[in-house]
Amino acid sequence: MFKYSVTQWIFGDESLEDSLIRLKKYGYQGVELAGEPDSIDLTETKKLLSEYGLVCSSICGIYSPERDLSSSNEKIRENAIQYVKKCIDLAKNLNASTVIVVPTCVGKLSPETSVEQEWNHALSSVKEVAPYAKEQNITLVIEALNRYETYLVNNLNLALRFVEEINHESVKMMADLFHMSIEERDNIEILTKILPHLGHVHIADNTREAAGLGQTDFKPVISFLKEKNYNGYITMEFLPAVSNPYVASGLHGESNIFDDFTEQSIKHMKELAAQV
């Protein structure tokens, strides 16, 4: 049986409690929180998670330009490294198992210096935080973002190469079906290739709406994950139509749309899981 969560920052500026009420209502087990360690009240967050019977599944790192692990600016890289360590601490404090890492900042569509140099900067940065993740028993998962959101690691073959070059037990990778709908030729072929390193899954349709509202055929993916006994979370990350996904975190949305998408996502996944 799969475990389901939702990335909470997609609900814009609504309160965590309102989000947890929604997730509880529709049968989710977990919530993925935004990686903003300095803004989260740990005591209140733990209280709310306990009250609504949910767990923190993971921490979604927010990689803005000042948190660029690949930057040619040493001070920015160091800031990014310390940021990931703070996210690891946050995950540890909330009993989450996973922190999402994007090797360069979102929206960076070309290198400041060269691809090779920035690839190596990103490798070095993640290698520096990996031992700390292991100490805290946290898994870092590398996320590949599509070519319209980043230039450095934008498909799962590149993410696999990145993880293999890191070569650390605490560094795995994740599959995001929205990005895959743009970048991958065959979902099952690439999932088979990355399976030994797969630690997390994000779900959104090709329109980035809730699963089942677009053209993506999720059934083969759910069948594959079930057959391979995938035991990580399936995390919904549907978003409004914005060019930079982080814009969504500050939007004031309509709760009925959030309700519809949250219900639609888990209903669609559960229906497919029951068929395979």
Image: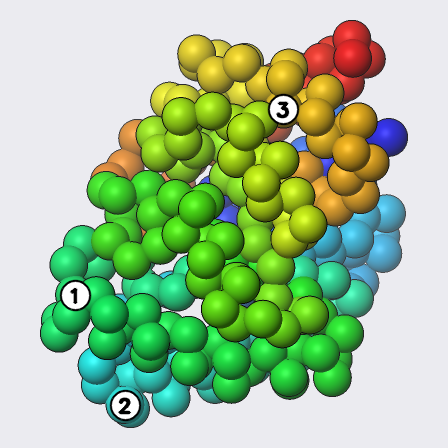
Residue placed under numbered mark 1 in the picture: 111
Label 3, residues with CA under 10 Å away: few <14, some 14-19, many ≥20: some
Relative to 190, 96 lies left or right: right
Can residue 223 be seen here?
Answer: yes
Amino acid at circle 2? Glu
Q: Position of residue 29 (x, y in %)?
A: 79, 41
Between discs 2 and 3, the one toward the N terminus:
2
- Amino acid type at image mark 1: Pro
- Kind of residue sitting beneath label 3: Val
Q: Would residue 41 be seen by someone viewing this image from the given angle?
A: no
Residue 197 placed where, x, y %? 64, 53
| Picture residue at 67% right of the left edge, 70% below the top | 170
Task: Name the residue carrying label 3.
Answer: 221
Q: Quadrant location of the N terminus?
A: top right
Which residue is identified by label 2? Answer: 74
Residue 103 vs residue 264: left or right?
left
Q: Is residue 42 above or below residue 98?
A: below
Using the numbered discs, state the Cα–Cα distance from disc 2 to disc 1 in whole angstroms: 15 Å
Sooner in the amino-acid sequence: mark 1 or mark 3: 1
Assess whether mark 1 and mark 2 are in contact (beta carbons under 8 angstroms).
no
